[in-house]
Each structure stands twice: as structure tokens, then as C-alpha cells.
Image (cartoon, rainbow, N blue to C red):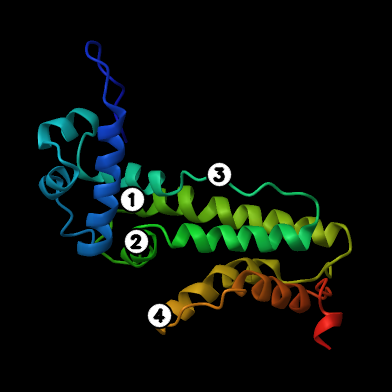
Amino acid sequence: MAEPARSGRPRDESIDACVLDAALTELSTKGYSAFSIAAVAEAAGTTRPAIYRRWSGRDALVVDAVAHLAETVAPEHTGDHFQDLVAEIDDFRHCIGAVGALPLAGVMLGDDVEHDVRTAYVERVVTPRRSRIRAILDAAVADRELDDDADLDVVTTFITGSWYSFRVAHREPPVDWPRRVAALVWSACGGEPPDAGSRR
């Protein structure tokens, strides 16, 4: 991860951001095994020594690039559990559309990715969102909006998996994908989506 700034001239934070964006692009286009500090430096308009002053090596830069991808403001939960789920799914749709986000998910499945890098991806990108989704569903169960025996372990995985299935088939998810996924989840877990009556 990024090293503490040394004394002396202040660190240029704009360089950090450029390097992290370039690193994500390198990962998503070339994969982990071909990831190159030299290529990142060239794309970011800086030098290898400048990168090594900030990061100890390739894996440290990759881990921070992954963390950079996850630096978004999470939707605020309002207590309207269904709408909160829609908002969380919609936020996922926007985040996965970020530069490098979708290809990076595939890169992280590769056998050549170091354990620490994959762990960082799971802990910083995947787990926080799944935890927020699970918290919404748990609250809905507690408020008797969903069945108390609903299989939430599986549900929290296939919510985002639906997006990847569309993209693997080279199809764009529908514009109303977040609400439709939330409605399917609600129905599968024994609840009734707010607009269910209008579709009958």
C-alpha cells in the first residue's frame, strides 16, 4: 500500500490519482501477470522512481488501485428496505461501469493473482457491498417484510451475479434492472414488492 509521505516537499496527490487510474486500466486491459510499473508510469505521465517513492512494489500498487476503485459514497439506508435495496443495486450498476471495474472482476479470478491482492479485492470491493445488501435484507426479515427462513446467503450472491450474466452474454442489462432484480429478490424471499399489484 502507499507509503507515508516523507519529510520535505509535499506529495503531489494528483500524481497518486493518475497512477491509480492508470494501474486500473493496465490491470483491466493486460491482466495481472502482464501488469507493468513502467507502463503505468508512462500512462500516468510520471516516472518509475516517482511510483516507487509512493509504493513499495507492484503488488502494493495493485492493492491500492483496487481500494481506489472502491472509494465511493455508499447509498444511505432510509428504512424503506425495498427502496434501499433498489438504491444499493443501482449503485452497484454505476460502480461496475467505472473504468476497469468489470474487467478487473475477471482478472481477480485468475490463478496468477497473488493471494494478498485477491484478498484485498474481496475485502475492499466485494465484502462491503454484500454486507450492506445483507443488512437491508436482515432488516426486512426483522420487520416481517420477508420470510425468516429466506435463503439470504444465496440471495446476496445472485443479486450482483445477474449483472455479470448479462455482460458475459454481451447484453446490456435493462434500464430498470435494479428494480426488477429487487422485485425478484423480494418475491423469492416471501415478500411482496411495492408495485406488485400494478403488474397483475
- Looking at the image, is 16 positioned above or below residue 116? above
What residue did someone put label 3 on? Answer: 73
Q: Residue at x 18, y 35 (%)?
A: 51
Mark before the other along the chain sequence, 2 or 4: 2
Q: Amino acid at mark 4?
A: Val
Please report the residue visible at 67 percent of the width from the left and 76 percent of the height from the top: 180
Specify the label residue 33 is tagged with.
none
Label count reads 4
Return the mark for residue 168. Answer: 4
Give the foreground label among 3 and 2. 3
- What type is the residue that disc 3 sits on? Val
Mark with earlier residue (3, 4): 3
Q: Which residue is mark 2?
A: 104
Residue 46 position, x and y percent, is 14, 37
Q: How far apart, in angstroms, are the residues tagged by discs 3 and 4? A: 27 Å
Circle on res. 117? 1
Q: Secondary structure at mark 4?
A: helix
